[in-house]
Image (tube, rainbow, N blue to C red):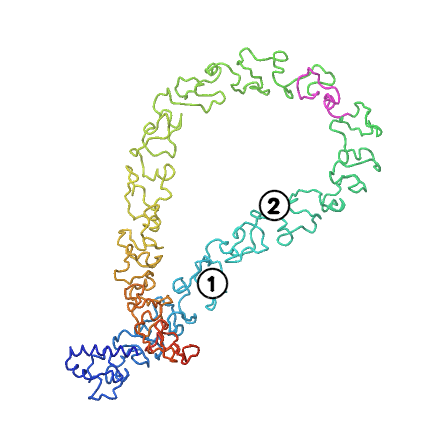
Amino acid sequence: MIGRWLAALLTVVFALAIVAGNPLSAARKSSFDHFSTGFPLTGAHVAVACETCHKAAVFKGTPKTCSGCHNDVRTNGKPANHIVTQAECDSCHTTRQWTINRFDHTGATQSCVTCHNGIKATGKTANHPQSSNECQDCHNTNSFAGARFDHSNVTGSCFSCHNGTKATGKSANHLPSSNVCEDCHTTTNSWAGARFSHAGITGTCFSCHNGTKAAGKSSTHLATSNTCEDCHKTSGWTPATFNHSGVTGTCFSCHNGTKATGKSATHLTTSNTCEDCHKNTGWIPATFNHSGITGTCFSCHNGTKATGKSSTHLSTSNTCEDCHKTAAWIPATFNHSGITGTCFSCHNGTKATGKSATHLATSNTCEDCHRTTAWIPATFNHSGITGTCFSCHNGTKATGKSATHLSTSNTCEDCHKTSGWIPATFNHSGITGTCFSCHNGTKATGKSATHLATSNTCEDCHRTTAWVPATFNHSGITGTCYSCHNGTKATGKSATHLATSNTCEDCHRTTAWVPATFNHSGITGTCYTCHNGTKATGKSATHLSTTNTCEDCHRPTAWIPATFNHVDANGTCVSCHNGTKVPGKPANHISTTDSCDSCHVTTAWTTVRMDHTQALGTCSGCHNGTKATGKPATHIPTTGDCGDCHKTIAWLPATFDHANVTGACSTCHNGTKATGKSPTHFQTTIGCENCHRVTAWIPTTNYIHSSPAYPGTHARQLACLDCHTTNSQTVPYRYASYAPNCAACHAGDFRAGSHPKYESPTRVNYTVSELRDCTGSCHIYTNSSLTTIKERRTGHHRVSASGFD
C-alpha cells in the first residue's frame, strides 16, 4: 500500500514535468489518470510516450509484468550476459534506477560460478584459498560468510592458506620449527595425529619436552636438574650419556634395582643406604663400619666376602670372636694354652712379636738366653753376637760415646779398632753438629787472620766436602759494598757496567744483586747508548716500524705513556692497527675489506670518508642504530632489510611493497608516514583493512556489519549513504527515539489504519511504538482483553522481500 501511494505521487510529479517539457506527450497524458488502471507509472516509465507500450492504439490488454514488455519484442529484454534467472525484472531492478539493483538468489537457475566468474559478478578474491570447488560447494546464497568447508578439492600447499592470514597458522604454543604444515600433518580431517621428526626443529629439547608441548621427564625418570640434551641425543633417545652432576635425591632413589643397579647378590647384608659407605665420585673404595651388620664374623670374614684368616694366622680352631672384637680387630685377647712348638715358631716377627728393633743382633734362639718362666733377666756373653759394635754400644744397650766425644754418626768401627781403642783414624763423613763446634781454635783450627769480618758460622758459606769455593751471602757483613767489591777481595763493576759514579748500594741490594733499582739521574749520552738491545732492552719485535729515536716519543722519567705522531711511521695503517700492536677495528666496526686509509685519515681518525663498495653483509648489519643510523622512530614497521627497499647509491626514493610490513594499515596510512584518509573519506574508526586490501586499494570489499542493530540485507540494495547520510559511521536516524528498530527510519511510512489490534467492542489500531519492529508480530485479537488471537500476522513485512508485503 505504501509503495502504491508513493508511485501515485511520483506519477503526478512526472506528469507535471512532462507537460512543461513535452506538450504533445503531456496533452495525451493530462486527461488520463494511469493510476486507475492498477498500473501506476513510476520512475523511467513516467517519461515514456504512451505509444511505446500501447502499440497500434490498443490500450487494454497491455502486459503489466516487466517481462511482458521487456522481451526483445516490445522493447529490449535481458542482455546476452544477463544472469540466468526466472525472476521478474522488478525482483532486482526498479523503474527509478536500473543499475542499482536489489538481488537475491531465489530465482537463479544455474550454478554460482556462471555469474561469480569475475565478469558478471565478483569471483574468487586474490586471497581466496586455492581450490577447484565451485562456490555452492562451500557457500550458501544467504550469506557469503559462514561457509562450510573441507579440503577435498583444495590445491596448493597447506601454508598457502594456513599462514595466519587466510586461515589459522601455527599457534603461539606450536613447536618452534621451520617445517611447513604437510611435513608433519597428514590428514585434512583432523589437525591432530601428526607424524613427527626433529628435522627443522629449532630451540632446545626442553623448549618442547617440558610436559606441556611434548612429553617431559617421566615419573620414573632420574631426579635431575639436567636438560634433555645434557644426556640424550635427538638421533636416538637411548642410549644416553650420563654422569652424576645435576642429579638430585639420594643414591637409593636410583640404585634400587629398578632405575639403576642396586646391591649385588653378594653384597653385605645391611640396611645402610649407598651413600653411607660409597661416594658418587668413586664407587670403590668404600668406607665401612659394622653398624647394622648381622650374623657372625665368619659369615663375612670367610675369605670370599671379606678377608678371612691370613696364611700366617695362628693355626687354631677358635672363631674370630674368641679373640677379636668387632669394635677393634686389634688388639686381640690371647693366651698360650694349646700352643705347641718352640717360641720362635710364633715369635718370629710374623705370627707374633719377634726380636725387638733394639734387641741384640744375634743368631741365638729365644731359649738360649730367656726362660719361659721369666723373660728378664736373661743370660749373656758375646758368643754368637752379630753386627757392629755400635749396634750394642749406642748408650742404650751398652755404654756408648763419652760426653766429650766428637759429635758424629760414625759407628765405633769407622775410626776405632777392637785391637786398640786409641789412636783412632778420622774424616768428616758422619760428623754431626756445626763446624764451629770443632773449628773454634781449640778442638781444630778456626778463622784465619785475613778472613772476612763476619759473625757467620763456617757452614753458612763453606762445605765440608770442599772448603773452597765457598757459598756466600751478605748477612752479618759490615762496611760498604766497595770495601769488598773493589776488584780485589770481590768482583767490582764489569767492563759493560753503566758509566756512573753511584756506589753499589745506590742500585743493588745485598739480598739479590739482580734485579737492581735504577733511575736515569746522572746517566749521560742518548737513550740508545744503553737501549740498543745489548746493555738494556731496545725496541721490541712488535714495536711500531719507525725511524724515530727513543727520545722522540719516550721520556726517561716515564717510558709510558709516550708521545706519538705518524710523521716517521713506516708501512700501512694495518701494519700497526691490527689489534696486536695497537687497537684494530673494534668489535662493532662496519664489516668491510677496506684498509684503514680507504676511509680514515691520520690527521683526524673520526672524520671518515665512506662508500659502500667494500662493505660486507646486509644493510641492517650496520644500519641497526649501533654501528650506523638505523630506522628512525617514524619508519614504517617492517621485518625486511634496508636493501629490500633502499639502494646504497641513493637512499631515496625507495621501492616499496607490503610484503614484510607489520602492524595495522593505520600505523602508516595516518597522513604522516603514508597517505591517510582523504577529506571526503567515510568517517569511521575501523581500520583500513576492514574494507581495503593491500593487493588492491580499489575496489573496496563489501563491509560486513557486526552491529546487532543492522537489520540485514534489504531487498533493495542500499548504498552506504542511504543510511549513513552524514558520511559517518554514526547513523542519524530520522526517528531516533525508535532506534535501533525499523521504525527509526520507517515511522513516517506507518499507516495505523492498516494495522488493527482488535475490532470489538470498537476498532483499535496499533501505534508506531508497538510495531516499531516491522518484521515482528501484529496479531489481530478477538476483543480488547487481548487473550484470544483472531488472526496471526507474523513476519508480514520482511527486510529481504522484493515488495513490502
Task: Please state, as top left, top right, bottom left or bottom right, where the N terminus lies in the image.
Answer: bottom left
Q: Position of residue 793 (x, y in %)?
A: 39, 78
Q: Position of residue 228 (x, y in %)?
A: 53, 53
Residue sticking out furthest to the top: 449
Q: Neighbour class for label 2 at 10 Å: few (<14), some, many (≥20)?
A: few
Check the image and report above or below for 762 versus 616.
below
Label of residue 184 in the image: 1
Left or right: 359 as drawn, with respect to 452: right
Foreground of the two, 533 or 724: 724
Foreground of the two, 681 or 690: 681
Q: Which residues are magenta?
A: 385-413
Q: Position of residue 617 (x, y in %)?
A: 35, 50
Q: Position of residue 679 (x, y in %)?
A: 25, 60
Query: In terms of sequence position, does the residue under pointer 2 or pointer 1 come before the other?
Result: 1
Check the image and report above or below for 173 versus 140.
above
Label of residue 690 in the image: none
Left or right: 76 as drawn, with respect to 373: left
Q: Which secondary structure type mostly characterizes the magenta part of the structure? A: loop
Q: Neighbour class for label 1 at 10 Å: few (<14), some, many (≥20)?
A: some
Check the image and report above or below for 648 versus 33.
above
Is 239 in the magenta? no
Residue at the disc numbered 2: 280
